[in-house]
Amino acid sequence: MPKMQVAEVVVKILEDEGVEVMFGIPGAAINPVYKYLGQSKKIKHYIARHEEGACHAADGYARATGKVGVCICTSGPAATNFVTGLYTAQVDSIPIVAITGTAVRAVLGKEAFQAVEIADIVKPVTKKSYCVQEPYRLPGIMREAFRIAREGRPGPVLIDLPVDLQRAEIEYDPETDRSLDFSVPKANEKQIKKAIDMILEAKNPIILGGGGVLISGAAKELQELAEYLSLPICASYMGKSVIDNAHPLYSGQVGTIVQTRLGNKLFCESDLVLAVGARFVDRHTGELEVYTDQGNRKFIHIDIDPLQIGKIVPTELGIVSDAKIALQMLIDEAKSRVGKVEPDEWVSSIPDRRKELARKLDFDDVPIKPQRVFKEMNEFFDEDTIFVTSVGLNQIWSGQYQDVKKPGHYKVCGCAGTLGWDLPASIGIKIGDPDKKVVGITGDGGLGFMVEELAMAAQYRVPIVMVVINNGFLSLIRQNQKYVYDYQYAVELWYDREPQENPIGIDFVKLAEAFGVYGERVERPEDLKLAFQRALDNAPAVIDIICEREVDCSMGSALDSIAERG
């Protein structure tokens, strides 16, 4: 059997697992692996400018492709910079394998230079973490890492490699080593029959599509079931693109933060919810008494993770299953029991009610109202555009106003609320899906968090467009201070408020140009579409849109008490 350095084995296994793209930054403690990465004919490496950016780019790549995203870095602060990215991937169920280097094994635990115990640090934010101590364990651990990342509810795994272990030699035969199989849970017939019974008996049943529908590739089955039984479709925020937003059965998102008026209203009128791949997080449910109608609203919960069933919302029927499998079983059972159900007045009225309850977007104000930005984007960008956004009022406006036509064409950092995620994630998404337009929607605060990754976009000519909703505030925090605490402090980002039409702050146009990226500022609503076209023609690009400063988002503490603002 041939002998190889462990570092070479790492790369051989990455190639065999189908890895084609990696994001990272080299360093002394990981350089043995980088030697063989540089020799690989199958893997392209993209150098980030911050390790967190590398992790977010791998996250975006995984969301775009459905494959495991891979990021790599050296020891110490490089490794700890992965923590936020791993946490973001964990709560959004994104499969990542993160590889870090560390000091030689003899000095671990002795506070040696950059010898941080990263495998212990990341335990709460990964599915599994390893610090490999025995060279011959490396192949099995790497195979297990990829299996764990993919199996069940996907998520991140970290492998920490001491530098002397990377240089060690082991006997290894790539021809006999292979990827590990993993199981996919499947609903049983009794559960499916009971679910159909409950749907047919309910007066106003609805489907709630969560992010798990998109992860499992089950949007087609969700739509088919809804159309066959005439079930309205609502979405959690992570499930925003489960169906064309203009579909006659789509009522919008449900939530206290990122919601649509009809989405919440229809949900509150329902008596049965078929929730598929949703986790019922607090910004979705709000006050549970309202969400469950004091326990009178029944829930069927389909999720691949058994620990999610009944965790937050009392569940009448819990089904542990891959969403695609369960939905297909529901379709088959429904077709064996009843003919196609015609929509009643409650269902057939959805398009008219959606139009009636839509929020106003067509403002002509200068400075530009954020609502107008999304009206122009909805009209300009085609159905193949992928929109990407992270936390902030920019995200909430995007969630409430952005039209999405195709499943998976809306990528969002959800439960972690990670500022700066959108830029590196957009890069990873575009690399993973190069034929699509990729448009990131960020704020002037959020872009500043990971702005260095414009260098990665420029270096590799990754043609993304970043749209900056620039109002000179950490505006989500400003709104929270205003309505919850009745004050405003430490949230201003413009250096001088007067005159407002000539704000002094970060010049994102010059900043973009400094990185080698096209930049343009827009101050009038009628100029937006032409600016978007120039951005596409010259991407990567940053469009800095100067917006009205104190526009607020509509939100509340319960589904039935959303304060309409803006």
Image (cartoon, helix red, strand yellow):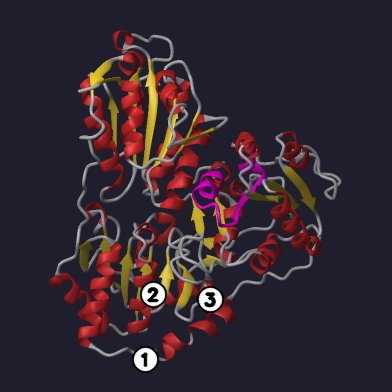
What residue is shown at x 69% (from left), y 54% (from top)? Answer: 536
In the rendered structure, which segment of residues is drawn in magenta? 427-448
Membership of 438 in magenta stretch: yes
Asked whether the beta carbons under mark 3 and mark 2 sit within 8 Å of each other, the answer is: no
Q: Position of residue 365 (x, y in %)?
A: 79, 64
Q: Amino acid at mark 1?
A: Glu
Residue 434 locus on image (x, y percent):
55, 52
Asked which secondary structure carries label 2, the reply is helix
Nearest to viewer (mark 1 / mark 2): 2
User: Which numbered disc flags the more N-terminal residue, 1 or 3?
Assistant: 3
Residue 515 in view, yes or no: yes
- Amino acid beneath label 2: Gln
Residue position for label 1? 342
| CB within 8 Å, label 1 to label 3 | no
Q: Residue at x 47, y 46 (%)?
A: 61
Tell me the crowding category of disc 3: few under 14, some 14 to 19, or many 20 or more residues within 10 angstroms, Cα based: some
Question: Which residue was labeled with disc 3?
Answer: 246
